[in-house]
Image (tube, helix red, strand yellow):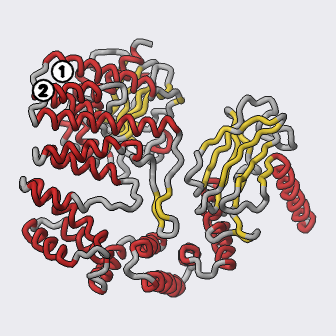
Amino acid sequence: MKKLTIILLVAVMAATKIYAQQRVVISPEFPERGQTVTITYDPSAPGAGIPPGAGVVTLVFSYSNFYNLAWRMNMQRTGNKWTTSFKLANYTTFATFYLESGEAVDKPAKDRHYEIGVYKNKVPVQDMSLYKAYSLSAQMGKSPLLADKQAALYKEELKRYPDNYEAKLRLLTYQINKAAAAKEKERLREQAYQVIANKFNSAPTVAGNMNKVTMGYLIIGENSRLDSIRRVVVERYPESALGRDIRTGVIARGKDTARQIVFFEEELKKETPENKESFTEIHDVLFRYYAAKKDSGKALYHARFMTTEKENPYRATTWQQIAQTLLDNSLALDSARAYAQRALDSVRSYPVGVIRHFPETGYIYPFADDSTREAVFNKASRHLLSMLGLIDMKQGRYAAGDKHMEQAVDYYADKETLDNAEAYYRQTNNVAKLGQLQEFRKKMLIEKVKKQRINRPAPPLNSFVDMKGKPVPAASLKGKIVVIDFWATWCVPCMQEMPYLQHLYDQYKQNPDIVFMIANSGARNTLADAQGWSGNKKYTFPVYYNTDPAIGDKFKFNIIPASYLINKEGNIIFSNIGFEGPEVEEKLKQQLEILLHE
């Protein structure tokens, strides 16, 4: 009977795989880097999760190192099927995806997604099985089988590539966690140490190798080792570029400024055309030091060495930082203008998204659609125009300054740009422009708030007690607009937010349609901590304590402070994660006003 069950199970699994293959075809079957991959989906095939009449089908990458591709790609209808194509970059290794159309989703199985592996002569490239193991958490969630299945893939990777450093450590970490005896755990941990030591000794002065060494300690759960391995580099290889970088960073964090400057000036005597890139951070530190000391000659000398001619996505932002430092110190304003203008002229090259860098590949630029690139360009250019306006003002060029500020303040201006404009109009005593700017800020905030509107059912608010430990009656919240803010006594940004919450509460506390719940929800807090909080004497808004440790998952936040506005029907309409500065008060007010007028 048991044998028959196993045969039936295998047959079902095989049939599922065949049906999935009929629904989704990936061509070529063994794609290689540089080739174009075409994915075809047939919604009429057996088991399809998306109906044939769907108006749109989207490919959603659930795990991917295809960084140059969008995470969501709309497919094109071709007859009764849907297709999409893309070229594999020279670093691609593995990706998983599922298909989506509205609420309908197509996956090959409940806990499995479709896969695209990258090959060389039909052999998986290095790291493919390793990345496949990583992808399982997105497919299987917190399944108890997850760790075992990942370990099997680490072994598969090591069969093909026995020297795969990361796979070795992942497998050893798995075995350490599974080992029951303390001696066995220690034996395996010693093996992990040796793997990391071998990696370190293979290239002890190469920054990319050091990153892999520190990652190795993180994999085995030993964060405290990171500083010690850096000390080894400084002690053994002090004249290497890596040793110098680490030592520079340590000394720059010290409080003895005089010692820092003497050390850095001495170090610069060792600079040569061959090793000059390892001195960039020293020049940066000295530039800021001499700018603060109002020594324009030395400041500008060091600024010259803060960028290189090699490909670097951060060159334009470095020019902007140099200009900002000179502006802040009212120093060498002609040079500040030149650096700001150089950055403005290069603003189209500003970095967009997370840019990765690996020794093997160089810089890897992520996918960014045209609207995102345009938004980065618009934000950066407006900010640089506002900087030029402030430089104009300090040089008494008010006509040019007015023009630059007019160009800076528009729909694309960010908070820093608007702050620059406000400083400009205050210092030039332009009351009319200040008033216009305040109205513009308010209009921008309202538009921003409207775009942030969501609509999802709020979790039950049955885990909150007042400062006497009494549960909050459900009837007191029914049919009310609820402003709930999650915080903790140890959270510094939460404490910074409190005065603004108090101002908001003072404006609306008499409104019978609104309920404020300032809820202590920190994992390391107890009801006694909430009761003993010094803010209870300082603020008058109602304070509550949350008793549900899973409240963050239910509300979907992992950072505090986090505030939510719930409408009278019990739906979350607005969410605000993190402290946003003084703007938070006006933002919450506008959100409240929207709900009050519905």
What is the three-letter code of the residue carrying label 2?
Arg
Q: Are marks 2 and 1 in contact (CB under 8 Å)?
A: yes
- Quarter of the picture containing the C terminus is top left
Residue 64 vs 173, above or below: the answer is above
Q: Which residue matches tag 2?
A: 426
Give the x, y percent position of residue 318.
Answer: 29, 52
Tag 1: Cα neighbours inside 10 Å, few (<14), some, or many (≥20)?
some
Q: Is residue 80 visible?
A: yes
Tag 2: Cα neighbours inside 10 Å, few (<14), some, or many (≥20)?
few
What is the three-letter code of the residue carrying label 1?
Leu
Residue at image point 32% right, 31% down: 413
Instruction: Identify which residue, 241 or 16, lies in the foreground.
Output: 241
- Along the horizontal axis of the image, is 365 left or right of 100? left
Q: Is residue 112 visible?
A: no
Instruction: Identify which residue, 411 or 302, lies in the foreground.
Output: 302
Residue at image point 32% right, 61% down: 308
Residue at image point 83% right, 43% down: 47
Which circle's residue, 2 or 1, is located before the other in the chain? Answer: 2
* Residue 214, image quadrant: bottom left
Give the x, y percent position of residue 167.
Answer: 58, 74
Residue 490 vs 385, above or below: the answer is below
Give the x, y percent position of residue 513.
Answer: 37, 16
Q: Which residue matches tag 1?
A: 434
- Quarter of the picture containing the N terminus is bottom right
